[in-house]
Amino acid sequence: MDVYLVGGAVRDKLLKLPVHERDWVVVGARAEELLNQGFQQVGKDFPVFLHPSTREEYALARTERKSGKGHTSFEVYASPDVTLEDDLARRDLTINAIAQSEGGEIVDPYNGVQDIKARKLRHVSEAFTEDPLRVLRVARFAARFAHLGFTVAEETEQLLRDMSASQELSHLVPERVWREWEKSLLTQTPAVFLALLKDIQALSQVLPGITADDSQLQRLQRTSAYSESATLRFASLFIEQATPESLKQFCRKLAIPNHYRDCALLARNHEYFITASVLPEKAQLTAILKNIDYWRRPEKLTQLLQLREAEFSQTKLSQNIADQHEKLNSGAKEAAALNAQALQQQGYTGKALGDALHEQREQILAEALN
């Protein structure tokens, strides 16, 4: 029985990047041998086990064969006669098909080390086409490693185009599409994910409604440079695109979490506020605060101001915008602290109480912004 470190951990070590998790492959063993050593099996479909002390994943060397449409239709064969090279052959990219022995020896049957040096994302074999999810994985890796100079190899890009043309992507489960997209939103260059999918004619199949035009991609990259928040980055895509209803439908279809949807709706409903270099008049500002339910959910204003700061972050107005927001935040907090009970003691009730509260809040905002 031989054990090898595989996949992303080996790749990231070679790239001198932090290694956050380690996966292992076990060659020449049966499931019973691992179970007898205290390993815990975690999957019914795949022979994957958790180490009794480190809780890291150990998988028996295996091969896979496509048995139907989509991402999950595969027959798995795990046996002591499956070699390390057989196991690595089923992986998507050469840079992910490198192993390291327990003694530190690099095993690289598909020239992944060479592709790391050349900064190329290249498929291991034609079996790549059997899993449509790999189209999104390549786009995610392209986004993740773009800042290091990685690009997709020409033959791999052509394969991605062919897979897109086959309509195989239509069989992907929406939740898996979202999972890959969300991961890309956490990279340094998330716009690369969308740009590549658009270039290979896959974007409309997996993310219908996302245009990935120059304006949208530039805003996404600008927001990404300003903030590492995946929520803000996602929301920036909808500042000038989609109707609120179509946005809701889009999020429902992909099972996108509510906090992403809500922030995107906030952005879409306040396009003018985000894109204008001058703050609205006090009456409109008070209306915005009421509209976003600031008095109960002050975090909504924080998101709105962050989106506006990102919009102007690479312009000469960035400091001016920050100064505006400091004053607005101060005034909004003071306005939120107004005590309605004091007005009630003065005899205000019903609509008159609401009007008086609104008027005082407007006055506080006006004074704060002067």
Image (cartoon, helix red, strand yellow):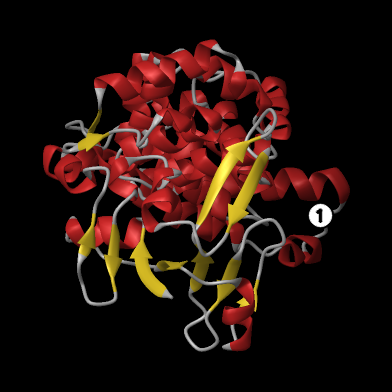
- For the point 18% across and 48% down, the residue is 113
Toward the front, the furthest residue is: 81
Say whether residue 280 is visible.
Answer: no
Question: Disc 1 marks which amino acid?
Answer: Tyr
Vertical relation: 76 (above or below) 55: above
Say whether residue 175 is visible.
Answer: yes
Q: Position of residue 20 (x, y in %)?
A: 36, 67
Find residue 299 and report its image quarter.
bottom right
Give the quadrant of the N terminus: bottom left
Q: Nearer the viewer, residue 278 or 54?
A: 54
Q: Nearer the viewer, residue 351 or 130?
A: 130
Toward the right, the furthest residue is: 350
- For the point 65% across and 41% down, the residue is 74
Q: Nearer the viewer, residue 50 or 369?
A: 50
Give the quadrant of the C terminus: top left
Horizontally, residue 163 falls left or right of residue 117, namely right
Find residue 6 and report its image quarter.
bottom left
Secondary structure at badge 1 equals loop
Horizontally, residue 37 falls left or right of residue 150, namely right
- For the point 69% across and 50% down, the residue is 357
Find residue 320 and report its image quarter.
top left
Q: Position of residue 60 (x, y in %)?
A: 52, 65
Q: Position of residue 37 (x, y in %)?
A: 57, 88
The residue wearing badge 1 is 348
Horizontally, residue 300 falls left or right of residue 252, namely left
Q: Nearer the viewer, residue 333 or 9?
A: 9
